Image: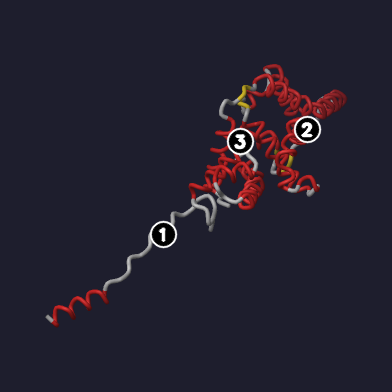
Amino acid sequence: MQDIGKKRETRRSDSKPKARPQRRKNRYHRGAKLSEHRFLRVLRGFADDQTARETSDATGISEKTIQNLFDRVRERLMRAVLIHPVRFGGAGYFLFDDRKISRRGSILFDVVSGSFLFKRTLMRHAPRVGATGAPKAAFSFLLLETVVRIFCTLSHPKDNEGLYSDEIQEAYANLQLVALYIHQHKDAPDDPALFEAVKESFERIMEDFPRILEQEEFINLVQGARKHHFASEAFYNDLRRYLLEDPL
């Protein structure tokens, strides 16, 4: 009997405590205390244009935590649009050129910044992000978010054939032929006077041509646009896909 008791004691002492199940990794936010499921609920609130307080009421997460996450997502949105110009309704394609704000992007930002839509956005979110105190970074991120949301509400062609009319494309093809003629005859033109006249006309046309293209793009963007019936869903899915690639 004593031997049996010793064997039981030995088994108890040798047995190892069971390891606690590891918490599931949050793939969207490195080192986050929030679970992936709860983080995605916060991201959904951001995509649905909720305030931090509204998302806090819906999730039970503190408003301060949610506001911090909203701010970080707004900052990350800039990088997402630059890296993936055709996502988010093609916002990056229209707003940026070589990672800088394009001329047409500047026009769009100016128009939106003076719109009622952006004033409404400032009233809802600015006191919490600090934009009313005029920190330029917070104001810029909020403005970018507003413009990107506009693009997510639209469904439109993103290729050059859809943006430009047949007349514009034909004119551009003819200009390419003129440019080829100038390049081939610049060293020894058969008729120097004619060559200089063609070159001067070409340079004048090319000064105005980018402006004509921009006007054509805006016309086709507005006329060909259709409201996206699931705008917040498109915004949410593009954000989620990007944060999988580049977590917070």
> How far from the left and from the top, in percent, is residue 222?
69, 22
Q: Are marks 2 and 3 in contact (CB under 8 Å)?
A: no
Q: Tell me the residue that label 1 is attached to.
A: 22
Quadrant for residue 162, please give it: top right
Q: CA distance from mark 1 to mark 3?
A: 35 Å
Q: Tell me the residue that label 2 is attached to.
A: 107
- The mark found on residue 88 in the picture is 3
Relative depth, front residue between 209 and 79: 79
The kind of residue tagged 1 is Gln
The kind of residue tagged 2 is Ile
Determine whether 98 is above or below 219 in the image: below
In the picture provided, is 124 more to the left or to the right than 20? right
First of labels 1, 3 by sequence position? 1
Q: Secondary structure at mark 3?
A: helix
Quadrant for residue 154, please give it: top right
Residue found at the very far top of the displayed protein = 167
Relative depth, front residue between 66 and 202: 66
Q: Are marks 1 and 3 in contact (CB under 8 Å)?
A: no
First of labels 2, 1 by sequence position? 1
Determine whether 6 is above or below 29 in the image: below
Q: Secondary structure at mark 2?
A: helix
Disc 3 residue crowd, few under 14, some 14–19, many 20+, Cα 10 Å: many
Q: How many marks?
A: 3
Q: CA distance from mark 2 to mark 3?
A: 19 Å
Which color mode does the image show? Answer: secondary structure
> How far from the left and from the top, in percent, is residue 245?
53, 48
